[in-house]
Amino acid sequence: MATRALDQDVIRRLADHSLTLITELQTTEGAYPASPTFSAYVGYCWLRDGAFIADAASAAGAAESASRFFDWCARTLNARSDQIEGIVRATNAGRPPSGEHMLPARFTFRGEDGTDEWWDFQLDGYGTWIWALGEHLQRHGLVAEPYREAVALTVDYLLASWQRPCYDWWEEHAEHVHISTLGCVAAGFQAVLRHGLISGERRTRVEAELADLRAHLLSDGVRDGHLIKWVGSTAVDGSLASTVAPLGVIDPASPLARRTIELLEAHLTVEGGTHRYLGDTFFGGGQWPLLSCFLGLAQDAAGDRDRANELFDWAASTATTDLDMPEQVDRHLIAPGMQQEWIDRWGTVATPLLWSHAMLLRLGVQLGRISAHRPSITPEGNI
Ligand code: BGC
């Protein structure tokens, strides 16, 4: 049967390699490099990639590594408290800073901005890191104290900014409000409420804004019964599966989740490989194993474990003979004529990409195909 096509030994070796890459490439500061070798990513840690990598490390038993990443997030944000308070003050005074003066999407390993130009104003990672932190603290029974200041700064930043258009997961279309981005912010707000990471007036404000955000998402973020790529669009985007799982913003049993999953399968997925969106030209617009894993998590949450297993098998099939997982594979390219242009510009596709390895681990653990085999840290305190 297709769902068990892959040898369990291959899966075990791929899982070990994935966790080893994640923990060994983690820097002394605690950051996760997006990819150790890909020209445009070398030297940077993205909040989005890092948060999902930490979530996978936490779920796969490498809890200490995840804690070190969250400590890095906390240090990085606490060091920017003046900048964040300035952004919040200016926004509340009706003078929101332009995108270049907002917080970046990626940081150097020391938590600085770096000198390369980037499409930096992206809000999703700020929601995702506090979501992943909440999951991690709960999963391992850890204390929230070391993170409270950074969580408060992040929440204040998001409260002031979540309604703004910004670049999406793919660092494109800064002119739109992206539904996946709203999903990440909602997940972050839900997490800080659920895990008691904030209190007092801040908590009351988050409750109110979360209600507004959800209402906005469920009206302007929906068309013909499914979630859409951005407000005003009619299309879907592969990142939308994350709102169902693992982020838990959309009820997996709802017609909205079911219809969105159906469209992600029908419009963006060939065999088990999921594209980012129709019209993608990046490296010719291939299939992304990490998106197949997000879709697998959503399918599993919605009750279709067989399909989730097929998606997992497809994602695993993208590993190279060295067991490295790429950002994308050039099967069923949407825009084959664009592939060479990107290779000439940045070199061959990012491989290994730690986020791809992370999502394979996360789905594999969810499906019981990968065991959380590293010893967990003790519940007495944080590492
Ligand atoms: C992707 C981002 C990702 C970054 C680092 C970009 O090409 O569009 O989603 O965060 O690579 O992996």
Image (cartoon, helix red, strand yellow):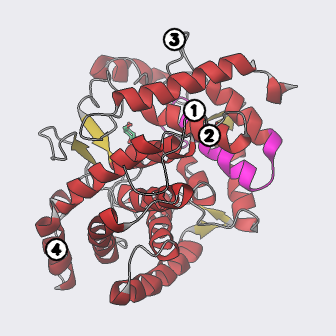
Point out the tag, 4 or 2, that comes first from the N-terminus: 4
Instruction: Using the rendered view, name the quadrant where residue 338 is placed.
Output: top left
In the image, 116: left or right of 296? left
Structural distance between the alpha carbons of marks 4 and 1: 38 Å
> In the picture provided, is 58 more to the left or to the right than 165?
right
Q: Which mark is residue 85?
A: 4
* Residue 348 image point, x, y percent: 38, 17
Left/right of residue 239 with respect to residue 348 in the rendered view: right
Answer with the quadrant where ligand 1 appears in the image.
top left
Ligand 1 closer than 8 Å to the CB at disc 1?
A: no
Q: Is residue 198 visible?
A: yes
CB contact under 8 Å: marks 3 and 4: no
**Which residue, as the protein is rendered here, is positioned at the far top?**
321
Majority SS type along the magenta span: helix
Q: Which residue is mark 1?
A: 289
The amino acid beneath tag 3 is Asp
Residue, x 28% and y 22% (percent of image)? Answer: 345
Q: Work out whether residue 149 or residue 287 is closer to the camera in this orientation and state it.
A: 149
The reply to whether dot 2 and dot 1 touch (C-beta < 8 Å) is yes
